[in-house]
Image (cartoon, rainbow, N blue to C red):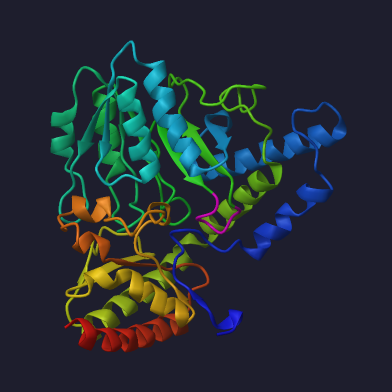
Amino acid sequence: MSENNKIYLDNASTTQTDQRVIETMLPYFNENYGNASSLHQFGTTAKDQIQTARKQIADYIKCNVDELIFTASGTEANNFALKGIAFANQTKGNHIIVSSIEHDCILNTCKWLEKQGFVISYLPVDAQGLINTDTLKRYLTPQTILVSIMHVNNEIGTIQPIDEIGKICKENKVYFHSDACQSFGKIPIDIRHVDLLTINAHKIYGPKGVGALYIKKEVNINPLLHGGGQEFGLRSSTENTPGIVGFAKATELCFNEMEKENKRIKFLQQKLITALSETIEGIYFNGDLTKRIPHNINFCIGGLEGESIRLLLLLDEEGIAVSSGSACSSNGDNPASHVLQAIGLNPFEARGSVRISLGRYTTEKDIDTFSNAFQKIIRQLKPIFS
């Protein structure tokens, strides 16, 4: 199949960089390429552009310019948030609460923090992937210093009530961090009750290798990286000027086009859910179908849960890219999804999901082509495994 005929339905893993973003970035590779810490004109030009980009993004999330710290990724920002808060506030307490369906970079950071003497509580979720705020209240102790709950889950698309969570944390004088990599630029985010927020560029048609952490003023946090004191002394490293410029442009495009784009994506999501429901016997969807980002569909097929990798490879042969959960969890031998197990699936079922994530370049024709190809593949597999 030619490159032009390929269909990409894995936008939750990463997105195609928008051509408008690429064009905005290009001058900062070979014309305005100075180090923002240098005092000459090359450096001051880069510094000014970084500050312009910072203000653009800050304005969209409604925070102060000096509350936005650029990082190299969402993973770095999440590490920065958890480790920075933990070590800066350990005289107050050593207890951190996270949900059981957080991204691996949060969960693995927590495992590391446990080895450093911190106590981690893993908040359960219901069958739809939603936390219970009453349970959160019960988990809070006088030793709790941080709650970290992702805004939108990367596998099942469930949207958590971060405004309500933030209010509970504020009432209990506990910092609240939210990983918003899957929601930023796609749905509105209210940060009024959020102390720290992780975002990144490559999920919103921007470049890879750039993210940011919003840190509300007066939050007590230690730097993760030490060096030349860039980013207000909180994140040392030479700034990625082209990436930061591209991040700002990608943010502008997403926020300006959000309402219209979400209507289009929602239509495609519902069309595909209906088509799959009507044609695939034994299909069941994972996650809440209403409190869910419109870009996400996650499902299993009864009797074929053990064949998800084969399904993905057969789709790939048809030129269609989907995933079986988080891209960051696919480095093992098809591990069972901790997210699907948290919502009640057994380990066998939790290996068998298909995640479809729609995006800016997904068309109605793509949905029809996927649906027809998928039905054909299921017909091939059913006699073999029935």
Q: Position of residue 152 (x, y in %)?
A: 34, 51
Farthest residue to the top: give it: 91
Q: Position of residue 321 (x, y in %)?
A: 45, 72
Q: Residue 168, relative to residue 185: is it above or below?
A: above
Q: Which residues, given as a range, are shown in magenta? A: 201-207
Residue drawn at 46 percent across, 83 percent down: 318
Q: Look at the image and tell me in which quarter the N terminus lies.
A: bottom right
Residue drawn at 47 percent across, 67 percent down: 359
- In the rendered structure, the answer to whether residue 5 lies left or right of residue 130 reads right
Q: Residue 355, relative to residue 188: is it above or below?
A: below
Q: Main secondary structure of the magenta part?
A: loop
- In the rendered structure, the answer to whether residue 93 lies left or right of residue 53 reads left
Magenta-span inclusion, residue 94: no
- In the rendered structure, the answer to whether residue 35 lies left or right of residue 161 reads right
State the residue in front, 253 or 28: 28
- Can residue 132 be seen here? yes
Q: Position of residue 378 (x, y in %)?
A: 28, 84
Q: Position of residue 32 (x, y in %)?
A: 81, 44
- In the rendered structure, the answer to whether residue 282 lies left or right of residue 74 reads left
Residue drawn at 18 percent across, 39 percent down: 133
- Can residue 193 be seen here? no
Quarter holding residue 42 = top right
Count of marks overlaid on the render:
0
Magenta-span inclusion, residue 203: yes
Q: Look at the image and tell me in which quarter the C terminus lies.
A: bottom left
